[in-house]
Image: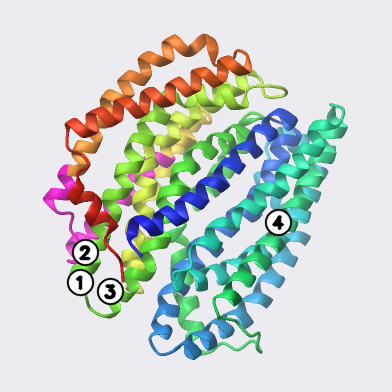
Protein backbone atom coordinates (compact mmCIF):
# COMPACT_ATOMS: atom_id res chain seq x y z
CA UNK A 1 0.00 0.00 0.00
CA UNK A 2 1.27 3.49 -0.79
CA UNK A 3 2.30 6.06 1.79
CA UNK A 4 -0.67 8.28 0.89
CA UNK A 5 -3.12 5.37 1.22
CA UNK A 6 -1.62 4.23 4.53
CA UNK A 7 -1.71 7.76 5.92
CA UNK A 8 -5.18 8.24 4.46
CA UNK A 9 -6.44 5.13 6.25
CA UNK A 10 -4.89 6.05 9.60
CA UNK A 11 -5.48 9.79 9.26
CA UNK A 12 -9.06 9.39 8.03
CA UNK A 13 -10.10 7.24 10.96
CA UNK A 14 -8.12 9.47 13.31
CA UNK A 15 -10.06 12.42 11.89
CA UNK A 16 -13.33 10.67 12.75
CA UNK A 17 -12.02 10.15 16.28
CA UNK A 18 -10.96 13.81 16.48
CA UNK A 19 -14.43 14.92 15.38
CA UNK A 20 -15.90 12.91 18.24
CA UNK A 21 -13.19 14.45 20.43
CA UNK A 22 -14.33 17.93 19.43
CA UNK A 23 -17.91 17.07 20.30
CA UNK A 24 -16.64 15.76 23.62
CA UNK A 25 -14.73 18.96 24.39
CA UNK A 26 -17.63 21.16 23.30
CA UNK A 27 -19.84 19.27 25.74
CA UNK A 28 -17.15 19.42 28.44
CA UNK A 29 -16.87 23.18 28.08
CA UNK A 30 -20.60 23.71 28.21
CA UNK A 31 -21.35 21.25 31.04
CA UNK A 32 -18.29 21.73 33.30
CA UNK A 33 -16.98 25.15 32.19
CA UNK A 34 -13.45 26.07 33.34
CA UNK A 35 -11.92 25.84 36.81
CA UNK A 36 -13.23 23.90 39.82
CA UNK A 37 -14.62 20.50 38.80
CA UNK A 38 -13.48 21.05 35.19
CA UNK A 39 -9.84 21.49 36.23
CA UNK A 40 -10.14 18.56 38.66
CA UNK A 41 -11.43 16.35 35.83
CA UNK A 42 -8.69 17.45 33.44
CA UNK A 43 -6.08 16.65 36.08
CA UNK A 44 -7.55 13.21 36.84
CA UNK A 45 -7.84 12.31 33.16
CA UNK A 46 -4.51 13.69 31.98
CA UNK A 47 -2.39 11.56 34.33
CA UNK A 48 -3.31 8.11 32.90
CA UNK A 49 -3.67 9.61 29.42
CA UNK A 50 -0.21 11.17 29.47
CA UNK A 51 1.32 7.94 30.75
CA UNK A 52 -0.53 6.11 27.99
CA UNK A 53 0.79 8.46 25.28
CA UNK A 54 4.27 8.53 26.74
CA UNK A 55 4.92 4.87 27.51
CA UNK A 56 2.34 2.86 25.58
CA UNK A 57 1.99 4.72 22.29
CA UNK A 58 5.35 6.48 22.23
CA UNK A 59 8.06 4.37 23.80
CA UNK A 60 6.53 0.92 23.60
CA UNK A 61 5.49 1.07 19.94
CA UNK A 62 8.82 2.61 18.90
CA UNK A 63 10.78 -0.20 20.57
CA UNK A 64 8.43 -3.10 19.80
CA UNK A 65 7.67 -2.60 16.09
CA UNK A 66 11.26 -2.82 14.69
CA UNK A 67 12.01 -5.91 16.81
CA UNK A 68 8.70 -7.54 15.91
CA UNK A 69 9.36 -6.93 12.20
CA UNK A 70 12.82 -8.42 12.57
CA UNK A 71 11.36 -11.57 14.11
CA UNK A 72 8.70 -11.71 11.37
CA UNK A 73 11.51 -12.13 8.84
CA UNK A 74 12.47 -15.26 10.80
CA UNK A 75 8.92 -16.59 10.63
CA UNK A 76 5.53 -15.84 12.15
CA UNK A 77 6.07 -18.36 14.95
CA UNK A 78 9.14 -16.45 16.13
CA UNK A 79 7.23 -13.16 16.06
CA UNK A 80 4.38 -14.77 18.05
CA UNK A 81 6.83 -16.13 20.62
CA UNK A 82 8.44 -12.70 20.99
CA UNK A 83 5.05 -10.98 21.46
CA UNK A 84 4.06 -13.60 24.04
CA UNK A 85 7.27 -13.05 26.01
CA UNK A 86 6.65 -9.29 26.01
CA UNK A 87 3.02 -9.67 27.14
CA UNK A 88 3.99 -12.03 29.98
CA UNK A 89 6.33 -9.39 31.46
CA UNK A 90 4.29 -6.32 30.55
CA UNK A 91 1.06 -7.42 32.25
CA UNK A 92 2.36 -7.80 35.84
CA UNK A 93 4.41 -4.60 35.51
CA UNK A 94 1.29 -2.68 34.49
CA UNK A 95 -0.82 -4.18 37.27
CA UNK A 96 1.81 -3.31 39.89
CA UNK A 97 2.36 0.22 38.56
CA UNK A 98 -1.36 0.88 38.32
CA UNK A 99 -1.98 -0.36 41.86
CA UNK A 100 0.79 1.81 43.29
CA UNK A 101 -0.43 4.89 41.43
CA UNK A 102 -4.03 4.40 42.57
CA UNK A 103 -2.92 4.09 46.21
CA UNK A 104 -0.62 7.09 45.86
CA UNK A 105 -3.17 9.22 43.97
CA UNK A 106 -3.76 11.71 46.85
CA UNK A 107 -0.05 12.55 46.94
CA UNK A 108 0.46 12.39 43.16
CA UNK A 109 -2.35 14.86 42.49
CA UNK A 110 -1.03 17.16 45.20
CA UNK A 111 2.11 17.61 43.10
CA UNK A 112 0.12 18.91 40.11
CA UNK A 113 -3.06 20.48 41.51
CA UNK A 114 -3.21 24.27 41.63
CA UNK A 115 -3.77 26.26 44.82
CA UNK A 116 -7.53 26.60 44.26
CA UNK A 117 -8.08 22.83 43.97
CA UNK A 118 -5.84 22.06 46.96
CA UNK A 119 -7.63 24.67 49.08
CA UNK A 120 -11.06 23.17 48.32
CA UNK A 121 -11.12 19.84 50.16
CA UNK A 122 -14.31 18.67 48.43
CA UNK A 123 -12.99 19.37 44.91
CA UNK A 124 -9.62 17.84 45.76
CA UNK A 125 -11.24 14.66 47.14
CA UNK A 126 -13.32 14.45 43.95
CA UNK A 127 -10.17 14.81 41.81
CA UNK A 128 -8.47 11.98 43.73
CA UNK A 129 -11.48 9.68 43.36
CA UNK A 130 -11.78 10.44 39.63
CA UNK A 131 -8.06 9.77 39.19
CA UNK A 132 -8.30 6.39 40.95
CA UNK A 133 -11.33 5.35 38.91
CA UNK A 134 -9.78 6.43 35.60
CA UNK A 135 -6.26 5.05 36.11
CA UNK A 136 -7.04 1.42 35.03
CA UNK A 137 -7.39 2.97 31.56
CA UNK A 138 -3.58 2.88 31.39
CA UNK A 139 -3.51 -0.90 31.93
CA UNK A 140 -6.12 -1.60 29.25
CA UNK A 141 -4.62 0.82 26.74
CA UNK A 142 -1.06 -0.44 27.20
CA UNK A 143 -2.23 -3.96 26.36
CA UNK A 144 -4.27 -2.53 23.49
CA UNK A 145 -1.12 -0.81 22.20
CA UNK A 146 0.69 -4.16 22.07
CA UNK A 147 -2.16 -5.53 19.97
CA UNK A 148 -2.22 -2.41 17.79
CA UNK A 149 1.54 -2.64 17.21
CA UNK A 150 1.10 -6.19 15.93
CA UNK A 151 -1.70 -5.10 13.60
CA UNK A 152 0.32 -2.14 12.29
CA UNK A 153 3.31 -4.41 11.67
CA UNK A 154 1.01 -6.62 9.61
CA UNK A 155 -0.03 -3.46 7.67
CA UNK A 156 -3.53 -3.64 9.21
CA UNK A 157 -3.82 0.02 10.22
CA UNK A 158 -7.58 0.59 10.23
CA UNK A 159 -8.60 -1.17 13.45
CA UNK A 160 -5.99 0.62 15.59
CA UNK A 161 -6.79 4.01 14.06
CA UNK A 162 -10.51 3.51 14.76
CA UNK A 163 -10.12 2.35 18.38
CA UNK A 164 -9.97 5.85 20.00
CA UNK A 165 -13.47 6.53 18.68
CA UNK A 166 -14.70 4.22 21.45
CA UNK A 167 -13.15 6.50 24.09
CA UNK A 168 -14.96 9.55 22.78
CA UNK A 169 -18.26 7.70 22.44
CA UNK A 170 -18.07 6.60 26.10
CA UNK A 171 -17.20 10.12 27.29
CA UNK A 172 -19.94 11.66 25.17
CA UNK A 173 -22.48 9.30 26.72
CA UNK A 174 -21.44 10.50 30.19
CA UNK A 175 -21.59 14.15 29.12
CA UNK A 176 -25.02 13.82 27.52
CA UNK A 177 -26.26 12.51 30.86
CA UNK A 178 -24.81 15.59 32.56
CA UNK A 179 -26.28 17.92 29.94
CA UNK A 180 -29.87 16.78 30.59
CA UNK A 181 -29.56 17.03 34.38
CA UNK A 182 -30.38 20.17 36.37
CA UNK A 183 -27.41 22.54 36.49
CA UNK A 184 -25.34 23.20 39.56
CA UNK A 185 -22.26 21.95 41.40
CA UNK A 186 -23.80 18.62 42.34
CA UNK A 187 -24.51 17.77 38.70
CA UNK A 188 -20.98 18.76 37.68
CA UNK A 189 -19.48 16.51 40.37
CA UNK A 190 -21.66 13.55 39.37
CA UNK A 191 -20.77 14.09 35.71
CA UNK A 192 -17.07 14.10 36.60
CA UNK A 193 -17.37 10.73 38.35
CA UNK A 194 -19.32 9.30 35.42
CA UNK A 195 -16.61 10.53 33.04
CA UNK A 196 -13.93 8.72 35.07
CA UNK A 197 -15.92 5.47 34.90
CA UNK A 198 -16.42 5.96 31.15
CA UNK A 199 -12.64 6.33 30.63
CA UNK A 200 -11.82 2.94 32.15
CA UNK A 201 -14.71 1.23 30.36
CA UNK A 202 -13.50 2.67 27.04
CA UNK A 203 -10.02 1.22 27.61
CA UNK A 204 -11.48 -2.25 28.11
CA UNK A 205 -13.63 -1.87 24.99
CA UNK A 206 -10.65 -0.79 22.89
CA UNK A 207 -8.61 -3.77 24.09
CA UNK A 208 -11.45 -6.12 23.13
CA UNK A 209 -11.88 -4.43 19.73
CA UNK A 210 -8.19 -4.71 18.80
CA UNK A 211 -7.88 -8.29 20.07
CA UNK A 212 -10.83 -9.27 17.87
CA UNK A 213 -9.21 -7.78 14.75
CA UNK A 214 -5.82 -9.24 15.56
CA UNK A 215 -7.38 -12.71 15.69
CA UNK A 216 -9.23 -11.97 12.44
CA UNK A 217 -5.81 -11.26 10.93
CA UNK A 218 -4.75 -14.78 11.94
CA UNK A 219 -2.47 -13.75 14.78
CA UNK A 220 -2.77 -14.46 18.51
CA UNK A 221 -0.57 -13.78 21.54
CA UNK A 222 -0.59 -16.59 24.10
CA UNK A 223 0.04 -15.58 27.72
CA UNK A 224 2.97 -17.40 29.27
CA UNK A 225 5.02 -17.30 32.44
CA UNK A 226 6.89 -13.99 32.98
CA UNK A 227 10.53 -14.43 32.02
CA UNK A 228 13.16 -11.80 31.26
CA UNK A 229 14.42 -13.42 28.08
CA UNK A 230 17.19 -11.85 26.05
CA UNK A 231 14.68 -10.55 23.53
CA UNK A 232 12.54 -8.94 26.23
CA UNK A 233 15.62 -7.36 27.80
CA UNK A 234 16.60 -5.96 24.41
CA UNK A 235 13.18 -4.35 24.02
CA UNK A 236 13.15 -2.82 27.50
CA UNK A 237 16.65 -1.44 26.94
CA UNK A 238 15.22 0.33 23.89
CA UNK A 239 12.08 1.52 25.71
CA UNK A 240 13.82 3.58 28.38
CA UNK A 241 15.44 6.09 26.02
CA UNK A 242 12.45 5.90 23.66
CA UNK A 243 10.33 7.38 26.45
CA UNK A 244 12.21 10.62 25.89
CA UNK A 245 12.83 10.32 22.17
CA UNK A 246 9.26 9.52 21.08
CA UNK A 247 7.48 11.26 23.92
CA UNK A 248 8.94 14.75 24.06
CA UNK A 249 5.51 16.24 23.39
CA UNK A 250 3.99 14.25 26.27
CA UNK A 251 6.90 15.02 28.60
CA UNK A 252 6.36 18.69 27.88
CA UNK A 253 2.74 18.21 28.94
CA UNK A 254 3.96 16.87 32.31
CA UNK A 255 6.14 19.96 32.63
CA UNK A 256 3.10 22.09 31.80
CA UNK A 257 1.19 20.47 34.66
CA UNK A 258 4.00 21.40 37.06
CA UNK A 259 3.90 25.04 35.94
CA UNK A 260 0.09 25.20 35.81
CA UNK A 261 -0.12 24.46 39.54
CA UNK A 262 1.14 28.01 40.20
CA UNK A 263 -1.24 29.62 37.68
CA UNK A 264 -4.84 30.81 38.26
CA UNK A 265 -7.81 28.43 38.34
CA UNK A 266 -8.97 27.51 34.83
CA UNK A 267 -5.50 27.46 33.25
CA UNK A 268 -5.48 23.64 33.03
CA UNK A 269 -8.81 23.63 31.19
CA UNK A 270 -7.67 26.39 28.82
CA UNK A 271 -4.53 24.42 27.88
CA UNK A 272 -6.47 21.17 27.45
CA UNK A 273 -9.08 22.80 25.21
CA UNK A 274 -6.45 24.63 23.15
CA UNK A 275 -4.41 21.47 22.77
CA UNK A 276 -7.44 19.77 21.23
CA UNK A 277 -7.14 22.07 18.19
CA UNK A 278 -3.38 21.42 18.00
CA UNK A 279 -3.91 17.67 18.33
CA UNK A 280 -6.27 17.54 15.35
CA UNK A 281 -3.63 18.03 12.62
CA UNK A 282 -0.91 16.49 14.82
CA UNK A 283 -2.91 13.28 15.20
CA UNK A 284 -4.20 13.10 11.66
CA UNK A 285 -0.88 13.97 9.99
CA UNK A 286 2.05 13.47 12.37
CA UNK A 287 1.03 10.35 14.25
CA UNK A 288 -0.46 8.80 11.10
CA UNK A 289 2.76 9.33 9.15
CA UNK A 290 4.99 8.13 11.98
CA UNK A 291 2.87 5.00 12.37
CA UNK A 292 2.76 4.33 8.64
CA UNK A 293 6.47 4.70 7.85
CA UNK A 294 8.06 2.90 10.82
CA UNK A 295 7.34 -0.69 9.63
CA UNK A 296 8.39 0.11 6.05
CA UNK A 297 11.54 1.95 7.16
CA UNK A 298 12.43 -0.99 9.41
CA UNK A 299 12.14 -3.39 6.47
CA UNK A 300 14.16 -1.18 4.08
CA UNK A 301 16.94 -0.68 6.62
CA UNK A 302 17.01 -4.38 7.56
CA UNK A 303 17.45 -5.19 3.84
CA UNK A 304 20.05 -2.38 3.50
CA UNK A 305 17.95 -0.62 0.86
CA UNK A 306 19.13 2.89 1.73
CA UNK A 307 17.75 4.52 -1.44
CA UNK A 308 14.26 3.25 -0.68
CA UNK A 309 14.55 4.44 2.93
CA UNK A 310 15.65 7.88 1.68
CA UNK A 311 12.72 8.03 -0.73
CA UNK A 312 10.20 7.04 1.92
CA UNK A 313 11.54 9.59 4.40
CA UNK A 314 11.49 12.38 1.80
CA UNK A 315 7.93 11.57 0.77
CA UNK A 316 6.81 11.55 4.40
CA UNK A 317 8.33 14.97 5.09
CA UNK A 318 6.90 16.50 1.92
CA UNK A 319 3.43 15.11 2.57
CA UNK A 320 3.49 16.21 6.21
CA UNK A 321 4.43 19.78 5.33
CA UNK A 322 1.93 19.93 2.46
CA UNK A 323 -0.81 19.33 5.03
CA UNK A 324 0.63 20.87 8.20
CA UNK A 325 1.95 24.29 7.17
CA UNK A 326 -1.40 25.61 5.84
CA UNK A 327 -3.18 24.10 8.86
CA UNK A 328 -0.79 25.86 11.26
CA UNK A 329 -1.13 29.23 9.51
CA UNK A 330 -4.92 28.93 9.39
CA UNK A 331 -5.23 27.99 13.08
CA UNK A 332 -2.80 30.73 14.12
CA UNK A 333 -5.04 33.34 12.50
CA UNK A 334 -8.49 31.85 13.15
CA UNK A 335 -8.02 29.78 16.32
CA UNK A 336 -9.94 32.26 18.48
CA UNK A 337 -12.87 32.21 16.03
CA UNK A 338 -13.11 28.40 16.15
CA UNK A 339 -13.05 28.40 19.95
CA UNK A 340 -15.77 31.05 20.17
CA UNK A 341 -17.99 29.32 17.61
CA UNK A 342 -17.75 25.80 19.00
CA UNK A 343 -17.05 26.17 22.73
CA UNK A 344 -18.33 29.49 24.02
CA UNK A 345 -21.69 28.75 25.63
CA UNK A 346 -23.19 27.62 28.91
CA UNK A 347 -20.53 27.45 31.63
CA UNK A 348 -17.75 28.41 29.16
CA UNK A 349 -17.66 32.22 29.19
CA UNK A 350 -16.38 34.71 26.55
CA UNK A 351 -13.33 35.28 28.79
CA UNK A 352 -12.66 31.51 28.83
CA UNK A 353 -12.96 31.42 25.03
CA UNK A 354 -10.59 34.39 24.61
CA UNK A 355 -7.89 32.74 26.76
CA UNK A 356 -8.26 29.42 24.96
CA UNK A 357 -8.08 31.05 21.52
CA UNK A 358 -4.89 32.86 22.47
CA UNK A 359 -3.32 29.56 23.52
CA UNK A 360 -4.33 27.91 20.23
CA UNK A 361 -2.32 30.55 18.34
CA UNK A 362 0.66 29.98 20.62
CA UNK A 363 0.57 26.19 20.32
CA UNK A 364 0.34 25.99 16.52
CA UNK A 365 3.57 27.96 16.10
CA UNK A 366 5.22 24.62 16.81
CA UNK A 367 2.76 22.41 14.91
CA UNK A 368 5.01 21.73 11.88
CA UNK A 369 7.86 20.92 14.29
CA UNK A 370 5.75 18.51 16.35
CA UNK A 371 4.79 16.71 13.15
CA UNK A 372 8.38 16.61 11.86
CA UNK A 373 9.56 15.06 15.13
CA UNK A 374 6.99 12.28 14.58
CA UNK A 375 8.24 11.83 11.02
CA UNK A 376 12.01 11.96 11.73
CA UNK A 377 12.27 9.80 14.87
CA UNK A 378 11.23 6.56 13.07
CA UNK A 379 14.47 6.84 11.07
CA UNK A 380 16.37 6.34 14.33
CA UNK A 381 14.00 3.75 15.82
CA UNK A 382 14.12 1.67 12.64
CA UNK A 383 17.88 1.41 13.26
CA UNK A 384 17.24 0.49 16.92
CA UNK A 385 18.83 3.80 17.88
CA UNK A 386 16.71 5.19 20.71
CA UNK A 387 19.63 6.99 22.37
CA UNK A 388 19.98 9.87 19.90
CA UNK A 389 16.34 11.05 20.16
CA UNK A 390 16.80 11.04 23.95
CA UNK A 391 19.65 13.53 23.66
CA UNK A 392 17.80 15.84 21.27
CA UNK A 393 14.62 15.63 23.36
CA UNK A 394 16.55 16.42 26.53
CA UNK A 395 18.09 19.51 24.94
CA UNK A 396 14.70 20.72 23.70
CA UNK A 397 13.20 20.17 27.15
CA UNK A 398 15.97 22.19 28.77
CA UNK A 399 15.15 25.02 26.35
CA UNK A 400 11.42 24.71 27.11
CA UNK A 401 11.86 24.68 30.88
CA UNK A 402 14.30 27.60 30.76
CA UNK A 403 11.87 29.70 28.75
CA UNK A 404 9.01 28.81 31.09
CA UNK A 405 11.00 29.64 34.22
CA UNK A 406 11.55 33.12 32.84
CA UNK A 407 8.25 33.82 31.08
CA UNK A 408 5.53 32.04 33.13
CA UNK A 409 5.72 34.61 35.97
CA UNK A 410 5.58 37.40 33.37
CA UNK A 411 3.03 36.31 30.73
CA UNK A 412 1.29 33.39 32.44
CA UNK A 413 -0.17 30.36 30.70
CA UNK A 414 0.67 31.64 27.18
CA UNK A 415 4.33 30.96 27.96
CA UNK A 416 3.60 27.21 28.16
CA UNK A 417 2.31 27.16 24.59
CA UNK A 418 5.05 29.30 23.03
CA UNK A 419 7.95 27.72 24.97
CA UNK A 420 6.78 24.23 23.99
CA UNK A 421 6.63 25.29 20.34
CA UNK A 422 10.17 26.70 20.43
CA UNK A 423 11.44 23.54 22.12
CA UNK A 424 9.85 21.41 19.37
CA UNK A 425 11.65 23.40 16.67
CA UNK A 426 14.96 22.92 18.51
CA UNK A 427 14.30 19.16 18.64
CA UNK A 428 13.46 19.05 14.93
CA UNK A 429 16.61 20.92 13.94
CA UNK A 430 18.79 18.61 16.03
CA UNK A 431 17.20 15.40 14.70
CA UNK A 432 17.56 16.48 11.09
CA UNK A 433 21.11 17.72 11.58
CA UNK A 434 22.20 14.39 13.07
CA UNK A 435 20.56 12.39 10.27
CA UNK A 436 22.47 14.49 7.73
CA UNK A 437 25.73 14.20 9.65
CA UNK A 438 25.49 10.40 9.80
CA UNK A 439 24.54 10.09 6.16
CA UNK A 440 21.16 8.52 6.96
CA UNK A 441 19.04 11.17 5.27
CA UNK A 442 19.32 14.53 3.54
CA UNK A 443 16.47 16.57 2.13
CA UNK A 444 16.88 16.98 -1.63
CA UNK A 445 16.84 20.43 -3.21
CA UNK A 446 13.63 19.46 -5.03
CA UNK A 447 11.73 18.62 -1.84
CA UNK A 448 13.17 21.63 0.01
CA UNK A 449 11.97 23.83 -2.84
CA UNK A 450 8.49 22.35 -2.62
CA UNK A 451 8.35 23.03 1.10
CA UNK A 452 9.38 26.63 0.47
CA UNK A 453 6.57 26.99 -2.10
CA UNK A 454 4.08 25.42 0.32
CA UNK A 455 5.06 28.07 2.88
CA UNK A 456 4.76 30.86 0.31
CA UNK A 457 1.28 29.64 -0.68
CA UNK A 458 0.18 29.64 2.98
CA UNK A 459 1.16 33.30 3.56
CA UNK A 460 -1.48 34.95 1.33
CA UNK A 461 -4.02 32.46 2.73
CA UNK A 462 -3.19 33.75 6.23
CA UNK A 463 -3.58 37.36 5.08
CA UNK A 464 -6.96 36.60 3.49
CA UNK A 465 -8.13 34.91 6.69
CA UNK A 466 -6.96 37.83 8.82
CA UNK A 467 -9.12 40.26 6.82
CA UNK A 468 -12.04 37.83 6.93
CA UNK A 469 -11.73 37.64 10.73
CA UNK A 470 -12.40 41.39 11.01
CA UNK A 471 -15.67 41.09 9.11
CA UNK A 472 -16.78 37.90 10.84
CA UNK A 473 -16.06 38.97 14.44
CA UNK A 474 -19.66 40.02 15.31
CA UNK A 475 -20.99 36.64 14.16
CA UNK A 476 -18.61 34.25 15.98
CA UNK A 477 -20.67 34.62 19.18
CA UNK A 478 -24.07 35.05 17.51
CA UNK A 479 -26.91 32.63 16.84
CA UNK A 480 -26.29 29.06 15.75
CA UNK A 481 -26.92 30.04 12.12
CA UNK A 482 -24.55 33.03 12.37
CA UNK A 483 -21.82 30.94 13.97
CA UNK A 484 -22.15 28.20 11.38
CA UNK A 485 -22.17 30.61 8.47
CA UNK A 486 -19.19 32.60 9.74
CA UNK A 487 -16.98 29.56 10.36
CA UNK A 488 -17.97 27.98 7.03
CA UNK A 489 -16.99 31.23 5.30
CA UNK A 490 -13.57 31.14 6.97
CA UNK A 491 -13.01 27.54 5.90
CA UNK A 492 -14.00 28.23 2.29
CA UNK A 493 -11.85 31.38 2.13
CA UNK A 494 -8.87 29.47 3.52
CA UNK A 495 -9.25 26.54 1.13
CA UNK A 496 -9.83 28.71 -1.91
CA UNK A 497 -6.96 31.12 -1.26
CA UNK A 498 -4.49 28.34 -0.49
CA UNK A 499 -5.58 26.32 -3.54
CA UNK A 500 -5.16 29.30 -5.87
CA UNK A 501 -1.63 30.10 -4.72
CA UNK A 502 -0.66 26.42 -4.48
CA UNK A 503 -1.55 26.02 -8.16
CA UNK A 504 0.20 29.25 -9.15
CA UNK A 505 3.38 28.21 -7.31
CA UNK A 506 3.32 24.62 -8.58
CA UNK A 507 3.06 23.04 -5.15
CA UNK A 508 1.33 19.95 -6.55
CA UNK A 509 1.49 18.39 -9.98
CA UNK A 510 0.71 15.01 -11.51
CA UNK A 511 4.25 13.67 -11.03
CA UNK A 512 4.22 14.57 -7.34
CA UNK A 513 0.90 12.85 -6.74
CA UNK A 514 2.13 9.70 -8.51
CA UNK A 515 5.34 9.70 -6.49
CA UNK A 516 3.49 10.03 -3.18
CA UNK A 517 1.01 7.32 -4.24
CA UNK A 518 3.79 4.85 -5.06
CA UNK A 519 3.42 1.56 -3.26
CA UNK A 520 5.61 0.91 -0.18
CA UNK A 521 7.00 -2.59 0.35
Residue at 27 percent of width and 75 percent of height: 301
Task: Give the vertical position of 388 relative to 277 (above or below).
Answer: below
Residue 482 appears in view: yes
Mark 4, residue position: 202
Mark 3–mark 1 Cα distance, whole angstroms, equals 7 Å
Image spot of residue 287 (x, y percent)? 44, 54
Left/right placement of residue 6 relative to residue 321 reads right
Mark 3, residue position: 300
Does residue 446 show up magenta in the picture? yes
Instruction: For label 4, count other residues whose C-alpha is less than 10 Å away and answer few (under 14), some (14-19) or many (20+).
Output: many
Residue at 18 percent of width and 51 percent of height: 511
- Element at badge 4? helix
Instruction: For label 3, count other residues whose C-alpha is less than 10 Å away and answer few (under 14), some (14-19) or many (20+).
Output: many
Mark 2, residue position: 310
- Element at badge 1? helix
Q: Earlier in the sequence, mark 1 or mark 4?
A: 4
Q: Quadrant of the C terminus?
A: bottom left
For the record, the magenta segment spans: 420-449
Residues marked 3 and 1 touching at CB (< 8 Å)? yes
Which quadrant of the structure image shows residue 221? bottom right
Amino acid sequence: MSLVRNVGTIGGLTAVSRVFGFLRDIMLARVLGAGGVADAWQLAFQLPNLFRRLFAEGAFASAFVPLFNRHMTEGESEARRFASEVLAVLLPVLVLFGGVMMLAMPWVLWLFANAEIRADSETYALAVLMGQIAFPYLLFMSLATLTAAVLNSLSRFAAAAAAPILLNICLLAALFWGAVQPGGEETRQATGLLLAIAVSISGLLQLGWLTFWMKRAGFSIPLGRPRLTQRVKEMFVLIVPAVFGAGVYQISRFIDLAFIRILPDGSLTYMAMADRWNQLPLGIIGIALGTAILPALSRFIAREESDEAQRLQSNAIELSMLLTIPAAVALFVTGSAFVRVFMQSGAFTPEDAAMTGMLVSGLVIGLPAYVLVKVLTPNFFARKDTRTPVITAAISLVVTVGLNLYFVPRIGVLSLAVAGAIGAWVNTALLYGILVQRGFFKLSARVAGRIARITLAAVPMGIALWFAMQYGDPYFSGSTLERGGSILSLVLIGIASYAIFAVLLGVLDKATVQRLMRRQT
